[in-house]
Image (cartoon, rainbow, N blue to C red):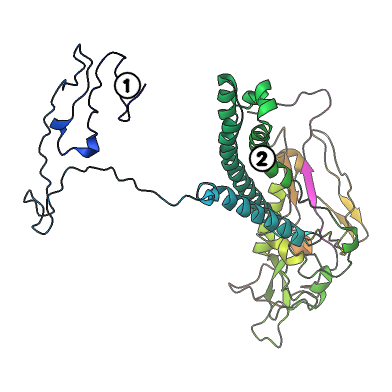
Amino acid sequence: MQRPDGYPSSPPGYPASSPAPRPQDVDSWDEIHIPAQRSGGESVPLKSVPVPTVVPVDVNGHGAYPAQQPLPKFQKRAVWLRFPSSPWLSTYSMYFFLVVGVCFAIGHHFFYSSLDGEVVDDQLRMLRWGTALAFACKASLTAAVLSAFDQQVWATVRSSFLSVVALDSMFAATENPLDMLNLELLTKAKMAVAMALFGWCAPAIVIITANTLLVAPPSFMHQDRMCRGVRSLNFDLEEAYNWTIGISQKQSGLKPLSPVLWNETNRDQAKSIGYYRRPDTQFWDLVQASTVLRRPITYDNSTLETCARGWNCTVRVEMKGPGYKCTELGSGVGSEARNLSQQSGEISPPFDFTKQLLPLGELSFLSQSFEGEYSQPQMEEIDEGGYPTKRWPKNFAAFRTEPIVWIGYVKTAKGIKKAVQP
């Protein structure tokens, strides 16, 4: 038996003891007695605990409340603060993340739909935006499912009887996927297992959606047109080129670069004619750089001027250029190079290849192309400004023939091993 105050009642044959006072019905801890069973059945105090006096300190530090606020007495009843209970307060995050995740999924769908069939422009940036939307969708839906998982776990605990092992596996299902293999958990908490399984499979959202945006060359976008800004070689422009005025190419609007530099024969522009001086410095630097690097020399974003971003352009350049015929005039160590015979006559080599090339000389390659009408200078009798001081020859400043290019090179004979690179 139990008394109303919570203590057990007296055994049969013993007088009933008076009920113990409740803490909320006394004014001091000294009045509280803990009942003890004795032979006389009386309730005697086991211990009287003195209550220390606590003087509250106010904001002014004087050790007492203001006069208008009396000292508080011993509370006789406990006061509990109660917040308004609503099922939405404990599950609002679940619904919030669910709505946010669906919004991100819809935004990802419409974003990729807007790119379908369009010309590819800044593909890397578009893939980054798509991946960001997919990751935000995955994170929001996972947060919503995990919040629902917590609610489902406690609902399962209240409605089903589970063993300790099954309870431990259910609470750890989102941290260890092997805990979902518990047979009791699979039979009595199917919904909780399904939610935990979604949390483990959610990263596939980001992986799968990254492959939904592909790039394919459309066959119907084939177009033939003149591409402005394509660099080319046009030797016909030299026929009407005046180096003092210059010339512009009307088709592209570009200013051509002349491959040579010119001098004048007279300070009077009306009586002056231009004559060849030497190759242009800028043109010569481009030729040497292209020869050393073994590729065309281009500047930054030059392809965007001829082919817009997102297009795959194939350019075909047609030009007329000089053709050369190669003639071998000598071969072997100690051999003597013979003269070159052509319609205009015979011409001897400008230098002795045998003495300048290996093994007698120090060079393995030698080229000479500035001879004859392309020699530098064209006349010996010129002043500092390049003007001839004497009357120039009849065919002065006229190119009647193509330049003759003399080339000497050394190659390894058969049966001789190549030298080891140092």
Q: Is residue 212 visible?
A: yes
Write down the residue under mark 1: 8
Q: Nearer the viewer, residue 42 or 193?
A: 42
Left or right: where 58 falls relative to 99: left
Rate crowding at label 1 as few (under 14), some (14 to 19) or many (20 or more) other CA atoms within 10 Å: few
Write down the residue under mark 2: 202
How far is the residue under mark 2 from the one under mark 1?
Answer: 58 Å
Magenta region: 400-418
Q: Residue furthest right?
A: 343
Q: Is residue 297 visible?
A: no
Q: Quadrant of the C terminus?
A: top right
Q: Nearer the viewer, residue 148 or 310?
A: 148
Q: Main secondary structure of the magenta part?
A: loop
- Establish if 372 lies above or below 365: below
Residue that appears at 20% across and 11% down: 39
Residue 257 magenta-highlighted = no
Q: Quadrant of the N terminus?
A: top left
Image spot of residue 182 (x, y percent): 65, 22
Q: Amino acid under label 2?
A: Ala
Image spot of residue 238 (x, y percent): 79, 72
Q: Earlier in the sequence, mark 2 or mark 1?
A: 1
Q: Residue furthest bottom?
A: 270
Q: Residue furthest left?
A: 62
| Quarter where residue 25 is shown | top left
Q: Secondary structure at mark 1?
A: loop
